[in-house]
Image (tube, grey):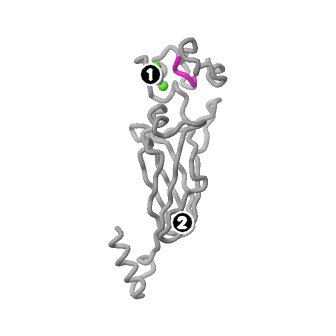
Amino acid sequence: MWMWRFWSRLLCLAGGLVAAGCTDYGSYSLEWKFAPEEPANTGCGLHGVDSLRLTGMSTEGDGEDVTTLCAPGSFAHSVPVGTWTFTVQQLDVRGHPIKPTDAQGYPLPDPTATASVAADTDTALDPPQIVLTPRPACGDGVDNDLDGRVDLDDPECGGLASTTAECRVDLDPECASPASATAE
Ligand SMILES: [Ca+2]
Ligand SMILES: [Ca+2]
């Protein structure tokens, strides 16, 4: 890649190529965590998120569509220079998009970030750290409390995928948070 850029740069300087061959590149970097304060290295597995899909457009008309593993919590990628706007989508283990919802079950937009990428420079996106909204524990495809029962198969979910805790209040004080207390 760098070799190609070196030669294309050289040819651009020589002035013999069409503009399309003379694009300058920089890179962007992004980090993520789960709300409210769950780092990616534990949160991705805990919430059933396998990877993230970053889609973006730049003011120069370039596009970006890449998928990266969730657990590392950071990603950097080379793109043509320009002002970029990215959307970050959570994907489950099958590669299907995960639709985040608020505590009442209403859909939330996927988070976005922007960056002005300059030539040969790494630019942190704004915001530099995306905060992902986890799915409710009873609708995330994960056996959160490790009792062998997943989501609606777990009686603690009360038959509702929107229930935010797949665990027993009497055994785990974490379940007694206000959000889970109102969800059966
Ligand atoms: Ca679950
Ligand atoms: Ca369970």
Residue 53, above or below 34: below
Q: Main secondary structure of the magenta part?
A: loop
Q: Nearer the viewer, mark 1 or mark 2?
A: 2
Residue 1, above or below 96: below
Q: Position of residue 91 (x, y in %)?
A: 45, 41
Under mark 2, the amino acid is Val
| Count of numbered circles on the image | 2
Residue at image location 45% in from the left, 74% down from the top: 23
Q: Position of residue 176 (x, y in %)?
A: 62, 19
List the residue tagged with mark 2: 117
Which of the labelled discs sits on residue 150, or is there none? 1
Q: Position of residue 117 (x, y in %)?
A: 54, 66
Residue at image location 34% in from the left, 78% down from the top: 7
Within-10-Å neighbours for mark 2: few <14, some 14–19, many 20+: many
Image quadrant in which the C terminus is located: top right
Q: Position of residue 151 (x, y in %)?
A: 48, 22
The answer to whether residue 165 is magenta is yes
* Nearer-the-camera pick, 21 or 177: 177
